[in-house]
Image (spheres, rainbow, N blue to C red):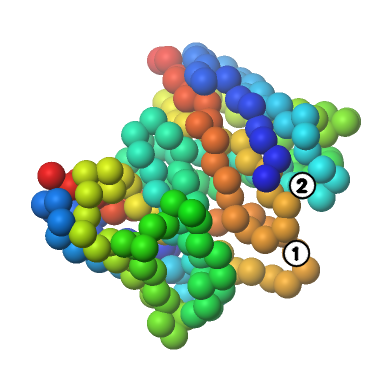
Amino acid sequence: DTGVSQDPRHKITKRGQNVTFRCDPISEHNRLYWYRQTLGQGPEFLTYFQNEAQLEKSRLLSDRFSAERPKGSFSTLEIQRTEQGDSAMYLCASTEEVIGTVSGKLFFGSGTQLSVL
Amino acid sequence: DAKTTQPNSMESNEEEPVHLPCNHSTISGTDYIHWYRQLPSQGPEYVIHGLTSNVNNRMASLAIAEDRKSSTLILHRATLRDAAVYYCILIRGGNKLVFGAGTILRVKS
């Protein structure tokens, strides 16, 4: 297993363009998370999926952001009409959720660094 | 989510032990204490977690105060590769991690 994979590693785009990021979690991990991190800050929770169901979305996730996880495997995060304030590292994490336990052991990818010019 | 307080930064000499403190005075009985670290240009990495008892693994030790209002992450022999941001996080049900700013650990050779 190669861990959580994110693509691309870096993305430079112009303001107003749409971008899409992909995350491939560790196989058989049923939970997948998206976080955003700006320089000097800890990661901020955006959303998470249990299999293909999106169970929670942060208020940080404006209507320009949409995330999907079709078939409960890989996930995509799309940002429409990007703004300079969207510039950040977008991190994906996965874990195996076992009912009745609190693991908290998430496996993170290396992230996608987005720069909006 | 219960809040944690950590020093902004700490410095250590290589091959010496490092004690990273975390205060969590509003912790509830069902909150687990987790530690993650983030090396430059990488995603966070799980280090250790515990509930009430002290815990050891190959990376570190976690010492939890008897009243659980504070904890300490112990790196027994710091190396240059341990230079990172260390996050102390409380988790109550589910697996959503809420990160603070963490402690920047600098290791001097």
Query: Dots 2 and 1: beta carbons under 8 Å?
Result: no
- In depth, the one of A77 and B20 nearer the eye is A77
Could you tell me the amino acid type at mark 1?
A: Thr
For residue A97, side relative to residue B37 (left or right) = right
The disc placed on residue B31 is 2
- Can you tell which of label 2 and label 1 is closer to the viewer? 2
- In depth, the one of B98 and A18 nearer the eye is A18
Q: From this viewpoint, which residue is outermost toward the bottom?
A: A71
Q: Secondary structure at mark 1?
A: loop
For residue A1, side relative to residue B61 (left or right) = left
Considering only vertical position in the picture, is A17 above or below A40? Answer: below
Could you tell me the amino acid type at mark 2?
A: Asp
User: Picture coordinates of residue A111 (x, y %)?
Assistant: 34, 52
Q: From this viewpoint, which residue is outermost toward the right?
A: B66
Residue B8 seen in the figure: yes
In which quarter of the view is residue B71 placed? top right
Question: Which residue does the numbered mark 1 point to in the structure image?
Answer: A101
Chain to which the residue tagged by mark 2 belongs:
B
User: Picture coordinates of residue B62 (x, y %)?
Assistant: 71, 35
Considering only vertical position in the picture, is B35 above or below A20? Answer: above
User: Picture coordinates of residue A107 (x, y %)?
Assistant: 50, 57
Residue visible at 14% across and 51% down? A15
For residue B5, side relative to residue A27 (left or right) = right
Mark 1 burial class by Cα count in 10 Å: few <14, some 14-19, many 20+: few
Residue visible at 18% across and 54% down? A11
User: Picture coordinates of residue A59 (x, y %)?
Assistant: 48, 54
**Label 2 to label 1, Cα distance in Å?**
12 Å
